[in-house]
Amino acid sequence: MLPLEGVRVLDLSRLLPGPFCSMLLADYGAEVIKVEDPGLGDYLRWYPPMIEETSAYFVALNRNKKSVTLNLKDPEGVALLRRLAETADVLLESFRPGVADRLGVGYADLKAANPRLIYCSLTGYGQTGPYRDRSGHDLNYMALAGALAQLRPGPDTLPILPGVQMADIAGAMYAAQSITMALFARERSGAGAYLDVAMLDAAMSWLPFVAARTFAEGTAPRPGITELNGALARYGVYGTADGKAVALGALEDKFWHAFCAAAGHPEWVKEPSEDTLRRALSEFFTGRSRDEWAAWAREKDLCLEPVLEFDESLDHPQVQARRLVATNQLRSPVPFPGVDAGLRTPSPRLGEHTAEILGELGLDPSEVQSLRERAVL
């Protein structure tokens, strides 16, 4: 039995953060009903690259879910969502603050009929504060959280543009965690909950070492002055003879001593200048290709790994052994005894399950067809 089997989730969210959250819940057995606008649905459906007529991005985030179309700007659509909410354990939405209330599907609207409902709002800046109504994306949340400033090669350079949506994914993971905690708490109290999860908050919480140093020293650490952000030559990225790179992570002394011994340079252990040591390491690593260095490090059990492109990572034996990829999708990586948290059903077609779900509410096919003709579905 899947751990979340029997939990029904109404997912009104779109794009990346909300669907990633509900995907985690669906992977572990929750029945996730994706509530979409008639016509376009989740905008991510139409974002290239495409797999046949559906976005590859949408496919990656919406496995194991069902799709229902409802026009929430129509009173009949709102009434149907309220009836669905009476059958649900969780509702997830990512509208700007106040929008759900204006539509008539906010927490106060739904709680009266279903006091056990867990209602999660996942937004950029949260439901309170002067930024609650501002628009934004991952890069903006990273910038305000102080996380983007840490992604600089040096103190006088601009931050790099991350290729990973860290604030979005962090927010999605905290939302999923908050929902599962609320489900557990409900088992004891019988009461639902309102959850206010923000991507800014999530991104900031991912900076415990930066925060610790700031609180201790009174100023935020700048790139190049901390052990994990450029101060140590033994912890960095170096180019190789074939124009690729390796990541050296010999942070603790025992790993650094082992690396120096294997490299045939015991004098590096006592090198007082990080700049001199960095130049020496840069020259050292240009002596072989990336894969030659990787084989050398494996043989000697060193904290040195190749910097792989993602398509290379897919073929790595450790990735294969951990079964992190299945049916051309990434699997949820949290192990649970007896659970295969992978693809059970493909991403749904827009509105694929509308008749099925509304039929559970007692609507017959002719009523569903009539609602479609009136653009309610």
Image (cartoon, rainbow, N blue to C red):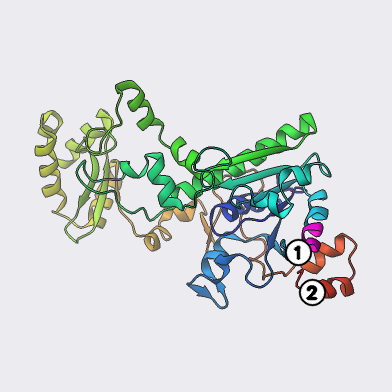
- Residue at figure coordinates x 53%, y 45% from the top left: 171
Left or right: residue 80 versus residue 67 is right
For marks 1 and 2, give the CA distance: 10 Å
Q: Quadrant of the C terminus?
A: bottom right
Q: Residue furthest top?
A: 216
Indicate yes or no whether the magenta region holds residue 45: no
Tell whether label 2 touches label 1 (CB within 8 Å). Answer: yes
Q: Amino acid at mark 1?
A: Asp
Question: Which residue is identified by label 2?
Answer: 374
Given residues 84 and 66, the one toward you in this image is 84
Left or right: residue 54 versus residue 217 is right
- Residue at figure coordinates x 79%, y 77% from the top left: 373
Left or right: residue 37 versus residue 187 is left
| Secondary structure that dominates the magenta span | helix
Q: Position of residue 265 (x, y in %)?
A: 12, 37
Q: Amino acid at mark 2?
A: Arg
Can residue 238 be seen at all in this image of the molecule? Answer: yes
Indicate yes or no whether the magenta region holds residue 78: yes
Read off the magenta span.
74-80
- Residue at figure coordinates x 56%, y 51% from the top left: 332
Q: Position of residue 126 (x, y in %)?
A: 55, 42
Left or right: residue 273 versus residue 371 is left
Q: Is residue 38 above or below residue 4?
A: below
Q: Secondary structure at mark 1?
A: loop
Q: What is the quadrant of residue 342 in the picture?
A: bottom right
Q: Secondary structure at mark 2?
A: loop
Q: Is residue 194 above or below residue 215?
A: below
Q: Which mark is residue 249?
A: none
Question: Which residue is identified by label 1?
Answer: 74
Of callouts 1 and 2, the N-terminal one: 1
Given residues 6 and 371, the one toward you in this image is 371
Q: Residues within 10 Å of mark 2 (few under 14, many from 20)?
A: few
